[in-house]
Amino acid sequence: MNLRNAKYSLMGAAGTLLSLTAFASAQDAAPAAEAAPAAAAAAAPVLNSGDTAWMLISSVLVLMMIVPGLALFYGGLVRAKNMLSVLMQCLLIASVVMVIWVFYGYSLAFTDGSAFIGGLSKAFLAGITPQTLSGTIPEYVFVVFQMTFAAITPALIVGAFAERMKFSAVLLFMILWVTFIYIPVAHSVWQSTGWLFTAGALDFAGGTVVHINAGIAGLVGCIMVGKRAGLGKDLMPPHSLTNSMIGASLLWVGWFGFNAGSALSAGPIAGLATINTFVATAGAAIGWVFIEWIVRGKPSMLGAISGVVAGLVAVTPAAGFAGPVGAIILGFVAAIVCFFFVTTVKNAFGYDDSLDVFGVHGVGGIVGAIGTGFLASTSFGGVGYAEGVTMGHQLWVQIQAVLFTIVWSGVGSLILYKVVDIIIGLRVRPEVESEGLDIVEHGERAYHS
């Protein structure tokens, strides 16, 4: 299980035990011989219905992030002729990954093994029953919660090459990517035998595992597939900012399951992650609008929702470690960095990241992952580091986690895109791109005049 986050699910029980021990000492009411069995019983995993209820809700909230949240957010940003293609990609990617997760994904990610991958002892969820516990919740619930993370991460990638990649190629690539890229990174960061876990990397809810991982894959993908036909010549504005606004709002609501759910309990750390998810996102929306207003003269709805997503991304790794003031600063800074990246750096290098997957998720994830190394310090209102760890050491570990994710996802994704290109080809034909993916690949239109 996600032991780094799971330790917080035991905080409530540990605090209760300490309080009882102090009371007994003050009253001199219980002999030491009787305290030992009580302590052992308190330490044993016990089902907690409140924690279970919260994790069930969190899992459903993360699903809402994918469909309809991400689907509508991305769908509104493309041209009308490609709306359904984006919705289909988000829906089917999530569906395929859920099946993979049951077959072998959960076992490879969350059983002990090497520094980079687990084993197959729980393939097809072998050995798990409704009574099997993972901390204070049923293991099935933990499986589902982590399944939603695995499902949304590859869906994020499609925004980078939207409007020009074959549906069959998207599905094949995502199957390979989840297997060879996502699962090893998740194991490395969140499982007790993973090398970044043992190194002490702080990633509360997926800054490296989800956002940097997907952002780098998106960057490689948009370069491999090539630019959209007519880019720089034809107008390609979002066809429905209304849909995108609704999608971004659903993402924000669902993100509480993503971040606060990663505490794996309905306790103090879930509360910390909740307030951080509120205020970091608010700070980022303000930051993006502020800088856009200065640079471009007008604050836009597209800018505001881009800031919302940038803030959500940046606070993800820090949600359970930073304090609220630090979270606001993190969101504000991340939004400004992402703004300049998508408006300046992308144009300078000339790649076509259609919906700024790398510029927001990749860059925002990097800012958040490294920023967590600062903001976890009690000096900045955070929860503090592990015993004996200094800020300098923690920052170095965070940088290692970022670099590992960039290299693993970048090199691995490049190979997988090439394999898919050889097998079935990545890009649709020019006439298909001109007509629109909706009608040619799916036989449907999002809108009828």
Image: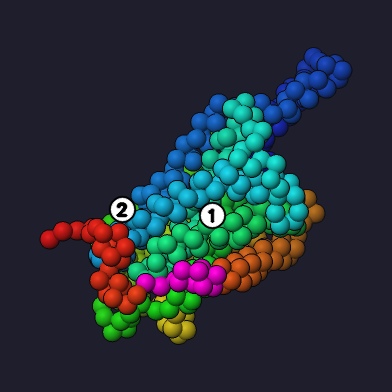
Q: Is residue 283 visible?
A: no
Q: In terms of image quadrants, where is residue 82?
A: bottom left
User: Among all residues in the image, which is located at the extreme left?
Assistant: 449
Residue receiving disc 2 = 246
Q: Is residue 399 above or below residue 294?
A: above
Q: Residues within 10 Å of mark 2 (few under 14, many from 20)?
A: some
Determine the residue positioned at 40% across, 55% down: 90
Q: Magenta stretch: residue 105 in it?
A: no
Residue receiving disc 1 = 316
Q: Where residue 269 sits: x, y (%)?
A: 59, 42
Q: Where residue 64 sits: x, y (%)?
A: 40, 46
Kind of residue at badge 1: Thr
Of the 4 image quadrants, the one containing the C terminus is bottom left
Q: Is residue 93 above or below residue 402?
A: above
Looking at marks 2 and 1 on the same chain, the residue that comes earlier in the sequence is marked by: 2
What element does badge 2 sit on? Answer: helix
Q: Is residue 444 visible?
A: yes
Of the 4 image quadrants, the one containing the N terminus is top right
What element does badge 1 sit on? Answer: loop
Q: Nearer the viewer, residue 33 or 164?
A: 164
Identify the mark at residue 447; answer none if there is no mark.
Answer: none
Does 188 sit left or right of 241 as displayed? right
Q: Where residue 261 sits: x, y (%)?
A: 53, 42
Determine the residue positioned at 30% across, 66% down: 437
Determine the residue positioned at 66% across, 49% down: 108
Magenta highlight range: 418-428
Determine the residue positioned at 55% across, 61% down: 177
